[in-house]
Image (cartoon, rainbow, N blue to C red):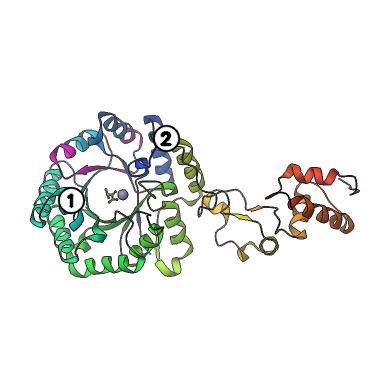
């Protein structure tokens, strides 16, 4: 089965989420957890942005010894020098150079012709090659770049020494169909791509970062980039945990695997949420509070008989101890009985019938009941209970 390399940019693109600022100690702790999670390459920062950022990357490089560390640089000598200083102590460093290629970016942001973009890319990669053997080159806004120009930039970047070519959907504009086609076309039209790692990096502006990333995997990319909990610029990046679990759950489609240690996912998610202050939405796939919670009576009944009826992933797989049966207005008698037994109450059929009737009255006034509500319910004198 082919391996998908996991490139985590929680500490670079993720930290670009509005309002997020991580201290050096928090960054080191997150980086060490990413190493434990089995990430292949951690993007630790953007050293040219400040002297503090250089220190952050140096501290991460010192602490993390078994995972490659990358940093971002624009296609400028000064940025590459800053990257070199930051990565001096890294065990397996990688320079990540970015330059936009789309007509919109060429015209309004860079004010460069196509030839100037190619020359600048070649200059930066060749300069970087003096200090780094691993160089990733990203064609920013690749998904809005003309195909012929994209092929040329990719080919010239590889000839200049890039070892990874990354084609990002920078503004979350792609659709799975077009994005998969883009990678197929690049593989067909640039044979040299077979000698390097082909990568993707998606944003979630239309809510399709995971779908687009999976389409790219299906079309043959070797590396995917993302963040924990999908944090990042605007609507965020691809959520690494969603890709890891999709590869695990749908091997029949993708026939690829990652090195992610699945049962470290939940802890990593909690750690990132805690330090960034970014709450994970309750219904977020894989790591949301409700991802393994079942409320409806029909689902609860199925779950209590056999969990695979309504769960495609076992919560323990991602490091969550157990599924939750939430007692809400859709819950049935079977779920209430299980909950009571769990709390130590063993009721006769008559008592259960009374308790269920009372439960339905309570739940009409609430969204869901907590264990204390159940204790109160049982202590009502109309149910004569043996505890
Ligand atoms: O979104 C983007 O294009 C980026 C690049 C630096 C890869 O973050
Ligand atoms: Zn990005």
SS category of the residue bearing label 2:
helix
Query: Magenta stretch containing residue 73, yes or no?
Result: yes
Q: Is residue 87 visible?
A: no
Of marks 1 and 2, the one in the foreground: 1
Quarter of the image containing the C terminus? Answer: top right
First to last magenta residue range: 60-80
Query: Magenta stretch containing residue 253, yes or no?
Result: no
| Mark 1 in CB contact with mark 2 (< 8 angstroms) | no
- Which mark is drawn over residue 29? 2
Q: Is residue 352 visible?
A: yes
**As displayed, is residue 233 above or below residue 275?**
below
**As displayed, is residue 378 above or below residue 334?**
above
Q: Earlier in the sequence, mark 1 or mark 2?
A: 2
- Name the residue rendered at 28%, 39% in the picture: 91
Residue 309 location, x and y as percent?
A: 62, 66
Q: Is residue 84 left or right of residue 203?
A: left
Residue 344 location, x and y as percent?
A: 79, 46
Instruction: Kindly indicate the quadrant of the structure image that contains residue 203.
Output: bottom left
Crowd tier of the residue under label 2, counting other residues whose Cα lies within 10 Å: few below 14, some 14–19, many 20 or above: some
Q: Is residue 240 left or right of residue 305?
A: left
Depth check: give the residue in front, 332 or 245: 332
- Name the residue rendered at 39%, 37% in the picture: 19
- Confirm if mark 1 falls within 8 A of ligand 1: no
Crowd tier of the residue under label 1, counting other residues whose Cα lies within 10 Å: few below 14, some 14–19, many 20 or above: few
SS category of the residue bearing label 1:
helix
Q: CA distance from mark 1 to mark 2?
A: 39 Å
Residue 200 location, x and y as percent?
A: 30, 57
Quarter of the image containing the N terminus? Answer: bottom left
Residue 303 location, x and y as percent?
A: 66, 61
Q: Is residue 294 left or right of residue 192?
A: right
- Which mark is drawn over residue 108? 1
């Amino acid at each position: 089965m082919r391996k998908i390399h996991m490139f985590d940019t929680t500490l670079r693109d993720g930290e670009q989420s509005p309002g997020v600022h991580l201290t050096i100690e928090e960054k080191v702790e997150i980086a060490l957890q990413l190493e434990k999670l089995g990430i292949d390459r951690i993007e630790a920062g953007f050293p040219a942005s400040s002297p503090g950022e250089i220190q952050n990357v140096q501290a991460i490089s010192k602490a993390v010894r078994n995972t490659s560390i990358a940093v971002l640089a624009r296609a400028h000598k000064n940025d590459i020098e800053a990257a070199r200083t930051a990565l001096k102590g890294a065990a397996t460093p990688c320079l990540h150079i970015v330059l936009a290629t789309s007509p919109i970016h060429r015209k309004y942001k860079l004010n460069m012709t196509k030839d100037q973009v190619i020359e600048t890319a070649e200059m930066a990669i060749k300069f970087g090659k003096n200090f780094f053997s691993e160089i990733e080159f990203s064609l920013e806004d690749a998904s809005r770049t003309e195909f012929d120009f994209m092929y040329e930039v990719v080919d010239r970047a590889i000839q200049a020494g890039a070892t990874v070519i990354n084609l990002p959907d920078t503004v979350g504009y792609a659709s799975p169909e077009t994005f998969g086609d883009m990678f197929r076309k690049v593989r067909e039209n640039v044979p040299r791509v077979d000698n390097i790692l082909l990568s993707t990096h998606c944003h979630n502006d239309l809510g399709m970062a995971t779908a687009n990333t999976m389409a790219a995997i299906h079309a043959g990319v070797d590396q995917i980039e993302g963040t924990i909990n999908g944090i990042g610029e605007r609507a965020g990046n691809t959520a690494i945990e969603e890709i890891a679990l999709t590869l695990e759950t749908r091997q029949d489609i993708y026939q690829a695997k990652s090195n992610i240690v699945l049962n470290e996912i939940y802890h990593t998610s909690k750690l990132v949420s805690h330090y960034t202050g970014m709450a994970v939405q309750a219904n977020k796939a894989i790591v949301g509070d409700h991802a393994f919670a079942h409320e409806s009576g029909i689902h609860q009944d199925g779950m209590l008989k056999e969990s695979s009826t309504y769960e495609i992933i076992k919560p323990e797989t991602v490091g969550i101890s157990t599924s939750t049966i939430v007692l809400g207005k859709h819950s049935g008698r079977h779920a209430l009985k299980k909950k009571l037994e769990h709390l130590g109450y063993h009721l006769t059929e008559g008592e259960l019938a009374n308790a269920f009737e009372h439960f339905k009255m309570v739940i009409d006034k609430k969204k869901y009941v907590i264990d204390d509500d159940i204790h109160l319910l049982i202590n009502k004198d109309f149910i004569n209970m043996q505890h």
